[in-house]
Image (cartoon, rainbow, N blue to C red):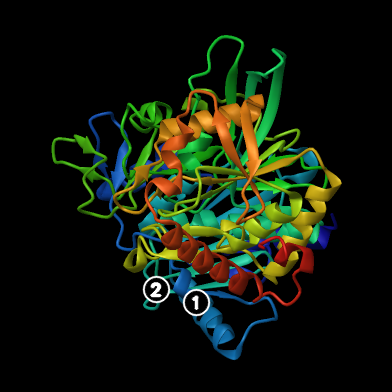
């Protein structure tokens, strides 16, 4: 490092200016190096302390601002430049908090992340700081987020080429978390990898031959469809069998199907959280080190996860170290099992086994329902999101084509479609957590007998150990004519969706018969 650079950094430190990714940030004051305890004390005016001693906060904005997000992949527009210049001028009169954290643990893949937020919103760096790993000493940031929650207009400007995101007019912590993850997934894409909105874990079971095997599993699914619940489930495995939970939100898949973890937390959606069905998550959520967001906490500190008066998108930051069935690792040596989670209610089976082409098709279909985490006004409505990943930067078809390449290169990776909703409509058969977790365990064991579905070409189960799979036979709920009409409608929807992507490989489109 030259003396001129050292002098520049010394000068900028004294003047409240920092040189980093993108243009310098100038502020009246920049507070750096604050500890988690110091940040919590600074945010005390907004805190209601729970009965467990944890902090809880209520935000003005209670979900991501997808409609207000602009991706400047082809360069900034005149309007975006005008907004950014106004922000930078405004920051000159504000006191900021700056904190650094690290994403990923694999030495060659670590990303240095820096957050700037105005001092009045100290709860945001307190919460976000718990999501990643300690900063890299002396490392300048690879990814930068500048957050002004009290900006008069709600707008998120993403500049992926520079690794910079401006968050304006939202005080929702999930916006910060996803801003960094979105940019990290774009960095993975530039390396020829895939950034996946997916949870991950290792499942260790005795297979049908009696041999003890370990299977890496990843779970795709939009918030609210069961991704976190299934990622963080122990499947009632005991003794030498068991699970090792790795990640909840984003993994970076390399061409050999190994998956790098990104975070040191789980930012769980607490809708329906209770100790019987979700014991691992519940225990971590009542830790004194958890941080609650938009969850009903009464004046006496008592917590009610099932009260949705504030929102059904209540959130809780929990540390991996306090989550049962985690270990020191966040990476997967290999994703042997890939599960696409949807939540349908008519004829989609609880599980289907897919060919590589079908797996790429289901990746592109991204079938799910809207939840309060995305667009609360459309919660419950059917939707499709490629890769169940609302944070893709660049052409979506490229992701599907690359995913198929990965599957073909790793032919023993098996893909499955999981339905966590119902079969037979609103009055039909509910697919319970116990059903799905057992199906996943049996998929790892090889304990499912399959047959080809004549309408779809994928394989559906004839028999699953410990699951009454006949409960989910659509013929119990529909006449042949009704079933045929539902198949025709769903097939048409799927074909129409895949046909939207001009650059998508034809074999992926043809995987839907």
Can you name the residue that lies furthest to the front here? 480
Residue 195 relative to residue 48: left or right = right
SS type, badge 2: loop
Q: Position of residue 274 (x, y in %)?
A: 31, 33
The residue identified by callout 2 is 151
Q: Position of residue 177 (x, y in %)?
A: 52, 53
Residue at image location 61% in from the left, 59% down from the top = 182
Q: Position of residue 400 (x, y in %)?
A: 72, 61
Q: Residues within 10 Å of mark 2 (few under 14, many from 20)?
A: some
Disc 2 and disc 1 in contact, CB within 8 angstroms: yes
Residue 423 relative to residue 463: left or right = left
User: Closest to the observer: 154 or 455?
Assistant: 455
Give the Cα separation between the discs numbered 2 and 1: 9 Å
Sequence-wise first label, 2 or 1: 1
Quadrant of the image occupied by residue 245? top right
Residue 189 relative to residue 296: left or right = right
Does 96 sit above or below residue 197? below
Quadrant of the snapshot with the C terminus: bottom right
Does 168 sit above or below residue 268? below
The residue identified by callout 1 is 87
């Amino acid at each position: 490092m030259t003396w001129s650079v050292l002098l520049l950094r010394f000068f900028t430190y004294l003047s409240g200016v920092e040189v980093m990714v993108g243009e310098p940030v100038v502020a009246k004051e920049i507070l750096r190096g604050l500890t988690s305890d110091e940040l919590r004390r600074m945010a005390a005016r907004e805190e209601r302390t729970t009965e467990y001693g944890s902090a809880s906060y209520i935000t003005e904005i209670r979900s991501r601002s997808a409609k207000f997000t602009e991706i400047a992949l082809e360069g900034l527009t005149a309007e975006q430049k005008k907004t950014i210049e106004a922000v930078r001028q405004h920051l000159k009169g504000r006191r900021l908090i700056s904190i650094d954290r690290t994403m990923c643990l694999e030495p060659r893949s670590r990303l240095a992340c820096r957050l700037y937020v105005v001092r009045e919103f100290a709860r945001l760096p307190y919460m976000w700081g718990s999501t990643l790993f300690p900063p890299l000493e002396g490392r300048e940031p690879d990814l930068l987020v500048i957050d002004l929650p009290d900006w008069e207009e709600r707008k998120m400007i993403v500049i992926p080429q520079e690794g910079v995101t401006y968050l304006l007019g939202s005080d929702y912590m999930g916006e910060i978390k996803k801003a960094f993850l979105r940019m990290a997934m774009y960095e993975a894409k530039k390396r020829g990898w895939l950034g996946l909105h997916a949870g991950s874990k290792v499942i260790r079971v005795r297979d049908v031959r009696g041999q003890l095997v370990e299977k890496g599993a990843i779970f795709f699914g939009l918030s609210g469809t069961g991704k976190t619940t299934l990622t963080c489930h122990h499947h009632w495995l005991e003794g030498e069998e068991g699970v090792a939970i790795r990640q909840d939100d984003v993994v970076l898949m390399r061409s050999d199907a190994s998956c790098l973890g990104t975070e040191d937390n789980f930012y769980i959606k607490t809708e329906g959280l209770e100790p019987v069905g979700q014991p691992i998550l519940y225990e971590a959520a009542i830790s004194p080190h958890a941080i609650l967001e938009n969850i009903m906490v009464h004046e006496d500190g008592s917590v009610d996860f099932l009260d949705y008066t504030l929102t059904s998108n209540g959130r809780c930051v929990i540390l991996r170290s306090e989550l049962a069935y985690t270990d020191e690792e966040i990476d997967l040596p290999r994703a042997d099992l890939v599960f696409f989670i949807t939540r349908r209610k008519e004829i989609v089976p609880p599980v289907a086994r897919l060919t590589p082409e079908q797996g790429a098709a289901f990746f592109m279909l991204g079938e799910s329902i809207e939840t309060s985490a995305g667009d609360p006004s459309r919660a419950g409505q059917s939707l499709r999101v490629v890769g169940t990943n609302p944070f893709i930067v660049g052409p979506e078809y490229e992701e599907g084509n690359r995913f198929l390449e990965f599957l073909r290169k790793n032919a023993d990776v098996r893909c499955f479609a999981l339905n966590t909703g119902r079969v037979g409509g609103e009055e039909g058969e509910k697919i319970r957590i116990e059903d799905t977790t057992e199906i996943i365990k049996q998929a790892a064991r090889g304990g499912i007998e399959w047959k080809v579905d004549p309408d779809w070409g994928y394989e559906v189960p004839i028999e699953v150990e410990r699951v009454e799979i006949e409960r989910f036979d659509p013929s119990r709920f529909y006449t042949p004519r009704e079933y045929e009409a539902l198949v025709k409608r769903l097939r048409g929807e799927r074909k129409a969706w895949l046909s939207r992507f001009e650059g998508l490989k034809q074999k992926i489109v043809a995987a839907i018969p």
